[in-house]
Image (cartoon, rainbow, N blue to C red):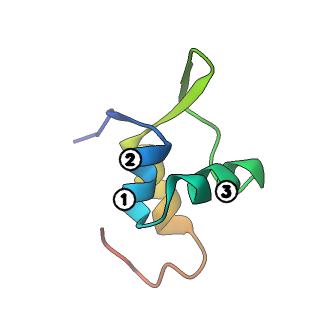
Amino acid sequence: MTDRRLWSYKEIAAHIRVQPDTVRSYRKHGLLPEPDHVESGKPYWYADSIRAWVAARPGNRGRRD
């Protein structure tokens, strides 16, 4: 089953256990995938897109959040 919920910086930060500003920094430095949706200038990602990104991140060590 696919998870098409849209996540903001806040939800991504909670998922990977960092502050939202850290996620913003990841995006600024090209470490975050392109947003799946932009609304009123704010980026959003599908939960599945972020889970795939987390799984592929270096140093992940098989984390299963």
Which residue corresponds to mark 3? 26
Q: Position of residue 32 (x, y in %)?
A: 63, 52
Q: Residue at x 75, y 49 (%)?
A: 28
Residue furthest toward the top?
A: 40
**Side (left or right) of 44 relative to 51:** right
Res. 15 mark: 1
Residue nearest the viewer, comparing 48 with 27: 27
Which residue corresponds to mark 2? 11
**Residues under numbered marks 1 and 2 in contact, where contact means CB atoms less than 8 Å apart:** yes
What separation in Å lies between label 1 and label 2 (alpha carbons)?
6 Å
Q: Earlier in the sequence, mark 2 or mark 3?
A: 2
Q: Looking at the rendering, in which quadrant would you find the C terminus?
A: bottom left
Quadrant of res 15: bottom left
Q: Count residues near mark 3 (Cα–Cα under 10 Å), then give few for <14, some for 14-19, many for 20+.
A: few
The kind of residue on which mark 3 rests is: Tyr
Q: Residue at x 59, y 54 (%)?
A: 21
Q: Looking at the rendering, in which quadrant would you find the N terminus?
A: top left
Q: Residue at x 68, y 49 (%)?
A: 27
